[in-house]
Amino acid sequence: MAKVLLTGASGFVGSHVLPALLDAGHQVVALCRSEKVGARVQSRIERSVDRLQVRVGDIENVDSVAAAATGCDAIVHLVAIPRDWSGGRDLDRVNHLGTANVVAAAQRAGVRRFVHLGALGVEERAGLNYASSKARGERVVRESGLDYTIIKPSLIWGERDGFFNIVAALVRIPAPVVPVPGNGKSRFQPVWAGDVARAIVTVLADAKGSIGRSYELGGPRYWTYAEITREVARALNKRRLIIPMPVPLIGLVAGVSEAIRLPFPVATDQLRQLALDNIGALDAVERELGFVPVDMAGRLGYLQRKISRQ
């Protein structure tokens, strides 16, 4: 089994990937921003604790990542942010330049194997800051000369997720309607966080077959934005009328909220992205990774619990 440096161990996806790596028999070095965060990561692990090591470091500091990576056989890079309030600068700093730093650290530490969490359907495109930042990060990985694999999921659901808890917060508002951006017909392919973790473990075990490849990751069916919202409402036992709303109108409210730093569920950049389809081939996971992904239908009961970042 390999010794794996895991970035983003304290985040949503990391909370699923870390135990999956340990269950697969790997030794894991979890890169955390502080000792406090590291202690929180360790507290979530109930088994195989002897194969978990926490190292303090930051993806904006190449030296700290290289030091943590020294002696590792592989790096799994998960760190990313979905939104910012700086016109895309923070998105680029983390999703693009942060990835470049982790790649540089891998090269410096002599770690050849690199598994990167990208995103489905991203490309550099004006007005789509998140997608552009993720696309630039993926390009850095592809051009790195490392033995890379890129995992590209659609929307990810599961305990401690961000997006579905945001939709749940909108559904909980005591109003009879829930607005959805655009016509509500944009399609997504929600994938369970546990299946993302399984995909990462799978490509690590099949190093030769997956090197230099990108895998699109999605669930077994397509969902429109309106259907996702109805499924969330069903999980919360709420009856809501779904009302399509023009993206520019919601974007105006979001833009004002961003300008004065008031909380708003989604950023203007995210609204533009959510109005577009985000899907791949329905059989891609089974065909390329050898397992059938979990269907989201009826499995969002975790949204009834208050989200915990602990």
Image: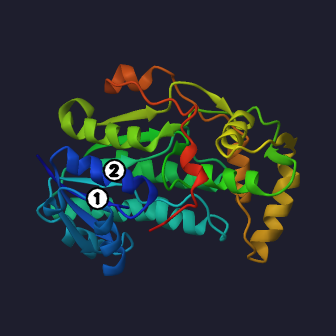
Q: Which residue is mark 2?
A: 17
Q: Secondary structure at mark 2?
A: helix
Give me the residue at 35% from left, 80% from top: 36
- Can residue 163 be seen here? The reply is no
Q: Residue furthest front?
A: 237
In front: label 1 or label 2: 2
User: Can residue 47 be spotted in the picture?
Assistant: yes
Q: Is residue 76 above or below residue 122?
A: below
Q: Residue furthest bottom?
A: 35
Q: Amino acid at mark 1?
A: Leu
**Tag 2: residue type?**
Val
Q: Position of residue 222 (x, y in %)?
A: 61, 27
| Percent of width and height locating residue 118 | 45, 46
Q: Residues within 10 Å of mark 2 (few under 14, many from 20)?
A: many
Q: What residue sits right under mark 1 in the picture?
A: 6
Q: Quadrant of residue 212?
A: top left
Measured from the top left, where is residue 251 in percent x and y?
Answer: 81, 56
Asked if 115 appears above or below 7 in the picture, the reply is above
Closer to the camera in the image, 113 or 7: 7
Residue at 45% over, 33% down: 216
Determine the CA span between mark 1 and mark 2. 9 Å
Q: Looking at the image, how many numbered discs can be counted on the residues?
A: 2
- CB-based contact (under 8 Å), mark 1 and mark 2: yes
Among numbered discs 1 and 2, the one appearing first in the sequence: 1
Q: Secondary structure at mark 1?
A: strand
| 223 to the left or right of 216 | right
